[in-house]
Amino acid sequence: MSVPVLHALRCMGFAEPPRIAGACGAPEAEVESQLIDLAVAGLVTRTPGGFGGWGLTGAGKREDARRVHAEVEAAGARAALTAGYQRFLVLNPELLDLCSAWHLRPGAAGDAGYDARVIGRFADLDRRAAAVCRDLSAALPRFATYRVRLGDALARAQGGEVEHLTDSMTSYHSVWFQWHEDLLCTLGIPR
């Protein structure tokens, strides 16, 4: 059974295989196969419907916590992860302010100058977040997927697909939220 698929679901909540595959950096067919194995083991379940998807069971949450704790201990990474989390916390209020600035932008279609300034501020934040992600990835390589996903969301927004800042399931804000959730889960910090 795959730790990345189980843990991705822990950080994402309910999700379908394409989003899980994107979060894990794995082929969708492999993720689907692993989801079936995890379901047989009673660790995940599939909820049908528009707001459904794959999600963890109570046993899945406990198993993920056990596996993540073992991963951190085996890597001897707790101190590095804690330091990285402290640096993340410095950036987090800025990200929240940027998301608010984006949602409150003037005009229904937005003001091109205002939009460019906010996107520029996202790019500045992203440069600083990249250093935090690099250090976290050195401690636990699975954190590298956040750098790729954040960079992709920002590049798409810069290219005109502005929903990738805050308004899609693959937006900068959504990926950031999952990164934050991952740090909390990995360090055993309750939300």
Image (tube, rainbow, N blue to C red):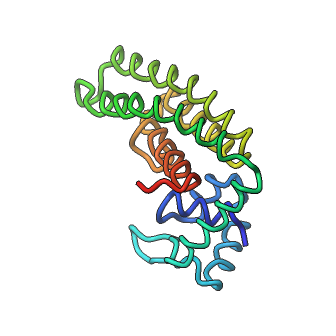
Name above or below for residue 115 compared with residue 152: above
Please name the residue shown 50% across and 58% down the image.
12
Q: Residue furthest top?
A: 113
Residue 111 x/y as whole percent: 30, 20
111 vs 161, left or right, is: left
Q: Residue furthest left?
A: 107
61 vs 49, left or right, is: right
Name above or below for residue 187 compared with residue 129: below
Please name the residue shown 50% across and 24% down the image.
125
Residue 44 x/y as whole percent: 56, 76
Residue 149 x/y as whole percent: 60, 41
Please name the residue shown 35% across and 18% down the image.
112
Please name the residue shown 42% across and 32% down the image.
95
113 vs 43, left or right, is: left
Name above or below for residue 152 compared with residue 183: above
* Camera-side residue of 66 and 36: 66
User: On the rendered image, what quadrant is the C terminus found in?
Assistant: bottom left
Residue 173 x/y as whole percent: 44, 40
Name above or below for residue 5 compared with residue 162: below
105 vs 180, left or right, is: left
